[in-house]
Image: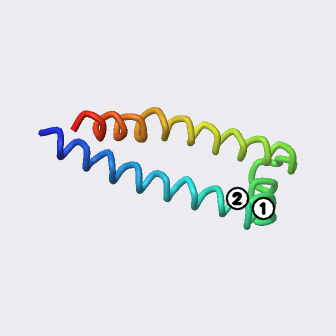
Amino acid sequence: MDMALLKEFFMWCTIINFGLFMWSAIMCILAKGFIYRVHGKMFGLSQDTVNAMIYGFLGFYKIVFIVFVLVPWIALTIMC
């Protein structure tokens, strides 16, 4: 596996993961009521708990995305 192929792999990983992150964030904003109803019935969670969990999920996803996908792609872009 050469550097160009690895760079392209991380580029596509970055694009796909950023799209998934944006879709998740937008759905959490636009479908708040639906998310509350579903999780409230399934797990008996309050709206405050669901908000905290969504905030934690998006924050964790963003950190993992930056550390494991975006930074390696930037490093490979600088190297090549």
Q: Which residue is mark 1?
A: 32
Residue sitting nearer the eye, 19 or 78 = 78
Residue sitting nearer the eye, 35 or 60 = 60
The quarter holding residue 7 reads top left
Q: Which residue is mark 2?
A: 28
Can you give x and y, in whole percent of width and height, for residue 44 in the image? 82, 48
In this rendering, the answer to whether 70 lies above or below 34 is above
Q: Residues within 10 Å of mark 2 (few under 14, many from 20)?
A: some
Separation of residues labelled 1 and 2 (CA atoms): 6 Å
Q: Secondary structure at mark 2?
A: helix
Amino acid type shown at disc 2: Cys
Left or right of residue 60, residue 43 in this image: right
Q: Residue at x 41, y 55 (%)?
A: 15
Can you give x and y, in whole percent of width and height, for residue 41 in the image? 80, 57
In this rendering, the answer to whether 31 lies above or below 5 is below
Left or right of residue 3, residue 49 in this image: right
Amino acid type shown at disc 1: Lys
Can you give x and y, in whole percent of width and height, for residue 34 in the image? 76, 66
Left or right of residue 46, residue 77 in this image: left
